[in-house]
Amino acid sequence: MKDLSVEGLGMVYELPKGGSVEALHDVSFDLEAGRLLTLLGPSGCGKTTLLNIIAGFLTPTSGSVTLGGDPIAGPGQERGMVFQQGALFEWQNVAQNVAFGPRMNRKKRSETNELVEDLLSTVGLQGFGDKAVYELSGGMQQRVALARCLANDPEVILMDEPLGALDALTREKMQSLILKLWQETGKTIVLVTHSVEEALYLGDRLFVMAPRPGRIEREYELPFAANGLHVDPREMKASPEFIEKREELLSLIWEMEEQIMGHEGGMA
């Protein structure tokens, strides 16, 4: 297992009509292998930019990201990505989608078929391998996306609002699935969300990011993810400890939003 290290990360976007936007400024942290980090903050705070740099989709303008001491200079199989929409291949069935990575790595068909069956069972989709993607609900499609990500056995799983498009009940079920996979696989997970409740429930470590420019404003070490498989989610989220922390975070995010609106009003 490899630790993730982010050092002095900065990202400036040059605008087509001149000028620039500083999306990230001097972001630094070390994430131990096997942790589940949630990134929370108002729109424009650089959460997705940070995730895309870790994924290797973007090259930062300053600073560095390393995994196990090796610099990240582009996409790689040691980092898997799960998007808000499943980004599945509509022309392939469920099993073919999950098998895509192993096939590209030229794994034996027998090994790939066994792996696919195991992963579909892990995400609760046993018996759905021959189904077309369009036959599945949004929640089921995200389960396929998770299985496809796991098929490459990445060191780090990156999730960009993976549950944002789901209804409340399905979202809560998928939160429990993510915790289950995290505990069973020991993978490092970095998850971006706009939901305070979700960030609290899933993250055993949580960063609140502030905008203009994007930076880590506050960091939390949390007990809820570790307890999530042993306590009913509704009971957990109704506990005084959870509610107190949720209200603290909501107030913090609200203050940031007010500052953003005040800044925009002053520039109008």
Image (cartoon, rainbow, N blue to C red):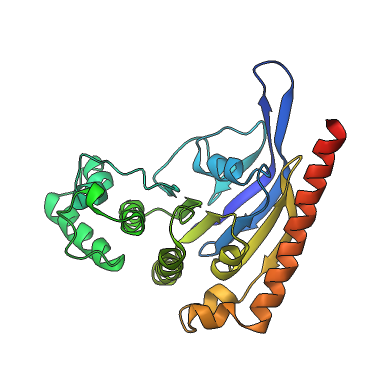
* Image-based side of 224 in relation to 149, left or right: right
The part of the image, by quadrant, that contains residue 183 is bottom left
* Whether residue 98 can be seen here: yes
Q: Where is residue 265 in the image (x, y as percent from the top left)?
A: 83, 37
The part of the image, by quadrant, that contains residue 194 is bottom right
* Image-based side of 59 in relation to 245, left or right: left
* Image-based side of 32 in relation to 127, left or right: right
Residue, x 68% and y 50% (percent of image)? 42
State the residue lying farthest toward the right. Answer: 266
Q: Position of residue 182 (x, y in %)?
A: 44, 67
Q: Position of residue 96 (x, y in %)?
A: 20, 47
Is 197 above or below relative to 86?
A: below
Q: Nearer the viewer, residue 72 or 180?
A: 180
Residue, x 19% and y 60% (percent of image)? 128
Total labels: the figure holds: 0
Which quadrant: the C terminus?
top right
Q: Where is residue 205 in the image (x, y as percent from the top left)?
A: 62, 65
Is 104 above or below relative to 135?
A: above
State the residue lying farthest toward the left. Answer: 110
* Whether residue 71 can be seen here: no
State the residue lying farthest toward the top. Answer: 17
Q: Which of 98 and 140 is in front in this view?
A: 140
* Image-based side of 223 in relation to 185, left or right: right
